[in-house]
Amino acid sequence: MNQLTPPFSEEHEELRASIRGFIERELTPHAAKWEEDEWFPNEVFTKMAGQGLLGLKYPQQHGGQGGDYLHEAVLIEELTRIGSGGTAAGIGAHVNIATPPIWKFGSVEHKRTYLEPAIRGEKIGALAITEPGAGSDVAALRTRATPVDGGWVVNGEKTYITNGVRADFMVTAVKTTEEGGHHGISFLIVERQEGVKSAALHKLGWRASDTATIAFEDVFVPAENLLGAEHEGFKLIMANFQWERLAMALGSVGAMRVAWERTAQYAGERETFGKPLSGHQAIRHKLADMATSVYTCQCVTYDALRRFVNGEEPLKEVSMAKLLTQRACFELMDECLQIHGGAGYMRGDSGPAPHVERAVRDARLGPIGGGSDEIMREILGRLL
């Protein structure tokens, strides 16, 4: 059991121990194979659901656990112990970015049809915003929904969509007017059907997650699948950005903590020149710097988390946490690899530390995804 660290309580630490045990029993042993296969099985979602882990923050009336964002924060940190950033990303995309808009803005029918089966692990969701020509610049979206009797016909393309191959439904940003800018963006829940075509993308890291380009070709979406108000979808995009970015910061903190623990253990066991690696001053100083980085990132992230759960609008603090943790995580992973030497550079199950090279690759997405370092600096520059 970890020492209590605000904003977490004893209840949260009991949940942490339970999640950690489940992950180490059921998921971690398969991480290397899933990374090699570039896929993890859908049964991971049903196993997670069986533990109540897909609906920690959702109301019990919808099949959730009736918890809050702190409970989910524990899950995000512990998912890093799978040893597969891709598996953690696929689960995280489902619970952190695909289902929250349905919970916040969906009708009773939306929640019954999509949220509740998602919490049970029966339907898998994806959030489809990014396009080949529109990433952080959401005003440049070109996927269009044309009104027809009973709904819309959607045409366009999305890319870099996590769970984009396997998703049963996609919470999709579309243009519903000819107007430029942020006005005229709407959200539709698009079900997997003929005309929805996914092409898998192959990545440097997060290999076990299915990431796809999705083409919509004359896809009919019924009127009742409009999520939120028509032409007001930009509000939906912005509504979950802070949690998505905070989740990425939490994930990096968890990953840094695990990597430091494993590297410190390795440095205490691996002998060179007649003594452990940690017996050499150069390595001890590296470990000290790394521990300081982990703690600093934790403090900044937990401060932003505390403000978020208290109902503040911590745009500055969340942006700082996202900016600080993503680059620091990658730099720490690089130091871990350096300390492991050749053992850290080996892929797969060969060598004593197969997790290290995966951790380095997985960490590189952090400064890009969910709002790049440059976007975070621009937000902060304007705020400050």
Image: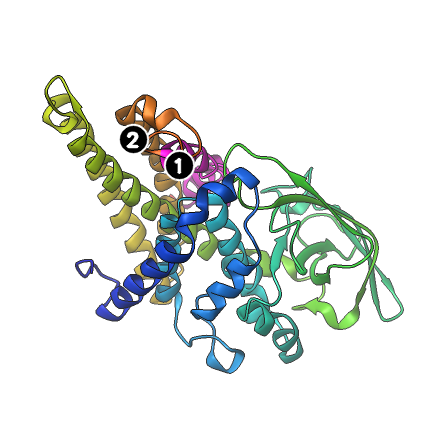
**54 to 31, vertically: above or below:** below
Q: Residue at x 53, y 61 (%)?
A: 45
Q: Nearer the viewer, residue 244 or 122?
A: 122
Q: In this picture, is 358 found above or below 167?
A: above
In this figure, which residue is indicated by the disc labeled 2?
A: 336
| Residue most extreme to the front | 350
Q: Is residue 64 visible?
A: yes
Query: Which of pointers 2 and 1 lies earlier in the amino acid sequence?
Result: 2
SS for callout 1:
helix
Q: How is the image coloured?
A: rainbow
- The amino acid on which the numbered mark 1 sits, given as a three-letter code, is Ala
Q: Quadrant of the N terminus?
A: bottom left
Question: Mark 1 Cα within 10 Å, few/some/many (few <14, many 20+)?
Answer: many
Q: CA distance from mark 2 to mark 1?
A: 9 Å
Left or right: residue 164 versus residue 340 is right
Q: Is residue 85 above or below residue 9?
A: above
x, y percent for residue 66:
42, 77
Is 172 contained in the magenta span? no
Residue 329 x %, y %: 35, 37
* Residue 380 on the magenta segment: yes
Q: Which residue was labeled with disc 1?
A: 359
Q: Are marks 2 and 1 in contact (CB under 8 Å)?
A: yes
The crowding category of the residue bearing disc 2, from other C-alpha atoms within 10 Å (few below 14, some 14 to 19, many at least 20), is many
Q: Residue at x 56, y 66 (%)?
A: 121
